[in-house]
Image: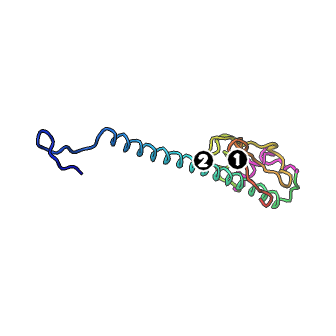
């Protein structure tokens, strides 16, 4: 630390341009890493919510199937003019409004994908899911193991 007086008789204080540039660069790098981490957390949260939606729908379908004695690959009896399993689940109270909208495809999964059913009026075979997400390949919105669902 140099305490020699400046030519005008007072000591210079403050940051130099180089010091200010270094401080700004460090702050920018910290903010960038914060945004990257928050984005990864959001994608993971969206994936988890999508998998939970698929699981809840699958459990409701299997519960309905077991309770009424339908076989794998079978079709339900027509009720209220439809054999659509999703409509039956909603009408009988197995699922709420939100999951019913997801099954029908009127709303999207949290990551922006859409749910689809191969056959809306047929119970899935053992080991198959009733609904799948369009992001299953791109962003891994597919369960690793769903055999016990």
Image position, residue 127 (x, y; %): 83, 54
Q: Which residue is mark 2?
A: 43
Image position, residue 16 (x, y; %): 29, 40
Q: Is residue 75 magenta?
A: yes
Q: Main secondary structure of the magenta part?
A: loop
Q: Residues within 10 Å of mark 2 (few under 14, many from 20)?
A: some
Which residue: 60% across, 47% down?
Answer: 43
Dividing the picture into quadrants, the one containing residue 117 is top right
Which residue: 55% across, 46% down?
Answer: 39
The answer to whether 51 appears left or right of 72 in the picture is left
Quarter of the image with the C terminus in it: bottom right
Dividing the picture into quadrants, the one containing residue 107 is top right
Does residue 76 appear in the picture of this structure?
no
Q: Residues within 10 Å of mark 1 (few under 14, many from 20)?
A: some
Image position, residue 87 (x, y; %): 74, 47
Does residue 22 appear in the picture of this structure?
yes
Image position, residue 100 (x, y; %): 68, 48
Q: Kindly identify which numbered label has been placed on residue 120.
A: none
For the record, the magenta segment spans 73-93
SS for dot 2: helix
Between the residue at mark 1 and the residue at mark 2, the CA separation in whole angstroms equals: 10 Å
Task: Return the residue nearer the eye: 138 or 95.
Answer: 138
Task: Return the residue nearer the eye: 38 or 46.
Answer: 38
Of the residues under marks 1 and 2, which one precedes in the sequence? Answer: 2
Q: Is residue 9 magenta?
A: no
The answer to whether 61 appears left or right of 47 in the picture is right
Q: Kindly identify which numbered label has been placed on residue 140.
A: 1
Which residue: 77% across, 54% down?
Answer: 61
Number of marks drawn: 2
């Amino acid at each position: 630390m140099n305490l020699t007086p400046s030519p005008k008789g007072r000591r210079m204080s403050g940051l130099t341009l180089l010091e200010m540039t270094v401080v700004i660069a460090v702050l920018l790098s910290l903010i960038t890493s914060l945004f990257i981490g928050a984005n990864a957390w959001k994608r993971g949260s969206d994936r988890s919510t999508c998998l939970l939606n698929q699981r809840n729908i699958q459990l409701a379908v299997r519960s309905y199937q077991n309770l009424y004695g339908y076989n794998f690959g079978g079709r339900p009896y027509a009720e209220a003019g439809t054999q659509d399993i999703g409509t039956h689940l909603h009408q009988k109270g197995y699922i709420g409004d939100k999951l019913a909208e997801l099954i029908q495809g009127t709303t999207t999964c949290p990551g922006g994908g859409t749910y689809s059913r191969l056959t809306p009026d047929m119970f899935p075979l053992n080991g198959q899911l009733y609904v799948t997400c369009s992001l299953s390949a791109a962003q891994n919105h597919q369960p690793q193991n769903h055999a016990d669902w």
